[in-house]
Amino acid sequence: MRMVKSPLEVEQMRRAIKITGEAHHACMRAGKHYRQEYQFEAEFEYTGKMQGVMHQAFGTIVAAGSHATCQHYIDNSGPIQDQDLVLLDGGATWNAYCADLTRTFPVSGTFSSIQRDLYEVVLASEKAGVEKVAPGVRMMDLHNHSAAILIDGLKQLGLMKGDTQELIESAAYKRIWPGALCHSLGLDVHDPLLPGYHKGDKALEPGMVITVEPGFYSQAFDPEIPEEFRQIGIRIEDDVLVTEDGYENLSVETVKEIADVEAMVQQGR
Ligand SMILES: [Mn+2]
């Protein structure tokens, strides 16, 4: 019952996701004003609450600079430098149904060249995952497809070497991306799935709602990563409904293209 959402359930999720997207936009527009992580947390949750959101789906993650390399950073207590990226992962609830969206943006309004290169790789991986969502597709296949795009991009930047399929099979890429691409979303932010959906043969069905969220997380002491690429965390996450003939990206209105993100921060408020 919880895996496959009814139309009424999807309507609640649309509302939660719409408000969450607006909260992300509010934070991007505030980029130039705030230099503490908790200020973005306040902006994000304020935007929701002003629209009647009584509960966040989970503790909002606002991770600047190297803090973003911790996937579930929750302190939100750090200062933000002018050149930092801010990774913001949050979700409103609406009538108990959850949203879960991540965006990563430069508080300066301009990605550095390295930030831009890495962001483009994660974005390509994310889009590839979203576009492959359809009934009959296994979550593991989605994950490996996005992983292949991520690995290919990192190879082009000289951050990974070797055969892409071997890197996937050996899980060597998990040094950079230890997470999972998808989880179910609904009454809980990590909604229950029957066994076999995450790693087994069970495939997606119409009415399921999943997240798609690849990331790049480079640690401080990774000898295989050039120093200028270390201590950077980037994640992009959308919420996707499986439809009869493919997918609907429920968070499509939340900007993620570099030009759109930069414009929103620069335009500001
Ligand atoms: Mn998520």
Image: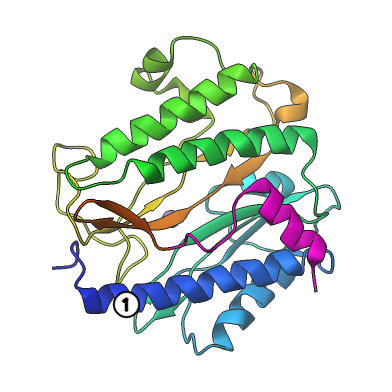
Query: Eyeballing the image, is 40 above or below 8?
Result: above
Q: Magenta span has 255?
A: yes
Q: Which residue is mark 1?
A: 11
Residue 219 is left or right of residue 114, and the answer is left
Q: Position of residue 65 (x, y in %)?
A: 73, 47
The part of the chain drawn in magenta is: 251-269
Q: Residue at x 26, y 55 (%)?
A: 242
Residue 63 is left or right of residue 36, and the answer is left
- Where ligand 1 lies, by quadrant? bottom left
Query: Eyeballing the image, is 107 above or below 141?
Result: below
Q: Residue at x 22, y 40 (%)?
A: 138
Q: How is the image coloured?
A: rainbow
Residue 46 is left or right of residue 7, and the answer is right
Q: Position of residue 187 (x, y in %)?
A: 30, 72
State the quadrant of the C terminus.
bottom right
Observer-nearest of 256 and 40: 256
